[in-house]
Amino acid sequence: MEVSPILTHSIMNTRTLTAPKAVAEAREQLAPDSYPCRLVGFLYLGTQPSKNPKFPKDKIKFRFTFEFPTELKEFKEGEGNKPYILSREFTLSMFKT
């Protein structure tokens, strides 16, 4: 069986991309309270290696991004008021019985 040259080319040129780590800056946070929010982003991060030696198994991770439309602030001068955004990463865990 002969392999297509296009298929061979695409397999041989597969690369893994690693995003650079962003430097987090101190940001103003919302006061602890209950706020209406909406989900504006859901990202599958794939299987990630564990950073905890107590739990060495790789984890499936997701990132949820929420927008708080009632809480507005001018983050950069001249851009007008924009809603607060919050992103959090979670693992997919299923309880086995």
Image (spheres, rainbow, N blue to C red):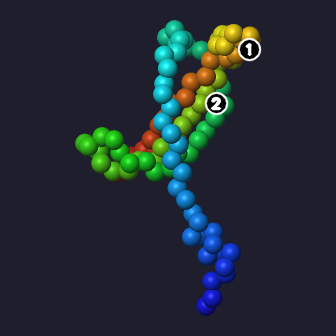
User: Relative to residue 51, is residue 23 depicted above or below?
Assistant: above
The tag earlier along the polypeptide, 2 or 1, is 2
Q: Nearer the viewer, residue 48 or 70?
A: 48
Front in this rendered view, residue 76 or 52: 76
Which residue in the protein does label 2 denote?
Answer: 39
Q: At which x and y percent is residue 26? A: 48, 16
**Where is residue 36 shown, x and y percent of the image?**
63, 17
- Element on which disc 1 rests: loop
Asked whether residue 70 is in view, the answer is: no
Other-residue count near label 2 (Cα within 10 Å), few / some / many at <14 / 14–19 / ≥20: few
Q: Amino acid at mark 1?
A: Glu
Image quadrant of residue 78? top right
Q: In 3D space, how far apart are the residues under numbered discs 2 and 1 (Cα atoms)?
A: 23 Å
- Residue at the spot of label 1: 79
Residue at the (61%, 22%) spot, across then down: 85
Q: Is residue 12 above or below residue 92?
A: below
Q: For residue 46, which numbered disc appears in the image?
A: none
